[in-house]
Amino acid sequence: MANHLVSGGTDGVGRVVALDALANGHHVVVVGSTQAKGDAFLTAADQVGASGRATFLCADLRLMSENSRVVDAVRARFDRLDRLVLCAQRYLTRLGHTVEGVERNFALTYLSRFALTYGLLPHLRRADRALVVNVCGTGTPAGRIRWDDLQFRAGGGGLRALAQAGRATDLLGVAFARRPDTRDIPYVLFNPDVVRTNLQRELGYPWRLFALAALTLRGKPVEAGVAPLLRLLADPPAERLSAFRGTRPVRMTSRLLAPGYDPSDAARLHAETERLLSGMGRVDLLP
């Protein structure tokens, strides 16, 4: 019986992962941003006789204060963490910042994943066969890190900020896998490819139209997109870092994709992130 934490676990990919874990007898904590969806998840857990193994935490993961609260709650609930599945995501194409001063895409898509990963690293290390899965858009060349203005304080398009956050998630995996204290914890970057979720409907125009057209042409039901991920969770890969787009491994060393997985960029982003969190007084979320 394993302990799971699934961020973004009340909807889409995360919900399927969480309910599958409960069906297999595991303990699951899910994090979501709305109480109504959390209640619906707990009702679904109760219907399969798993209410005693399901926990819901309502949190706005764009805020590091909320990530700290989640980390504390998971530490109190579990003595170890076997599976950390990072799914919380929103497609925000209008530039904006949180009350903590962080660009919103960067805060949720990247910084929250950094915070949960490293805030719970001691618990992951206590598990016999831990695994971290970052559900993201890996395997695409889009996006670059805006080193001179990570938070887009000088302005800029929200789509560029969204793309930067996606690139940062890949680099998070690269940096994690190169640390000596994570040697026994495989890290998987997983792109479910084109699946029918509500995320695309959050895009601004005209991007929403393009996304909905792609869904019509190529979109898969969430359950079909998640099936390869469920197999990875049941039987983790041996590699310290691996990336998949659906069932296909991503060639991270290919000429097209290699710049997005550059180890020197990963180290630089990690250092910048440590400085950012330290400046926010969130040393509890640092490795």
Image: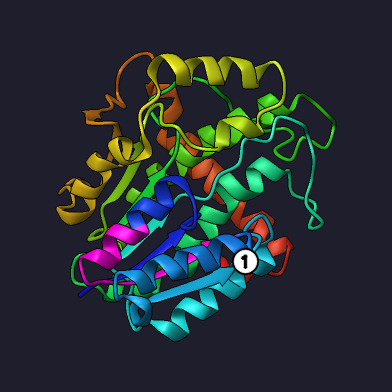
The answer to whether residue 140 is above or below residue 154 is above
Q: Read off the magenta span.
A: 18-32
Picture coordinates of residue 105 (x, y %)?
Answer: 65, 41
| Residue at point 82%, 37% (across, down) | 153
- Which sits in the foreground, 263 or 215? 215
Q: Taking 12 as reference, is 152 above or below it?
A: above
Q: Which residue is mark 1?
A: 35
Q: Nearer the viewer, residue 83 or 56?
A: 56
For the point 74% across and 35% down, which residue is it? 149
Instruction: Identify which amino acid the numbered label 1 is placed on.
Output: Gln
Label 1 Cα crowd, 10 Å radius (few <14 / some 14-19 / many 20+)? some
- Of residues 82 and 227, the one nearer the viewer is 227
Q: Tell me the element at label 1.
A: helix
User: What is the x, y in percent for residue 13?
Assistant: 41, 46
Residue 79 lies, with reference to residue 41, above or below; the image says: below
4 vs 67, left or right, is left
Quadrant of the rendered structure where residue 258 is? top left
Question: Height in image: 33 above or below 237?
Answer: below
Residue 222 visible in the shown view? yes
Residue 184, position as x, y percentages in the image: 22, 61
Residue at the extreme front: 47
* Quadrant placement of the N terminus: bottom left
Q: Is residue 19 magenta?
A: yes
Magenta segment includes 114: no
Which residue is located at x 60 percent, y 75 percent? 69
Q: Is residue 287 visible?
A: no
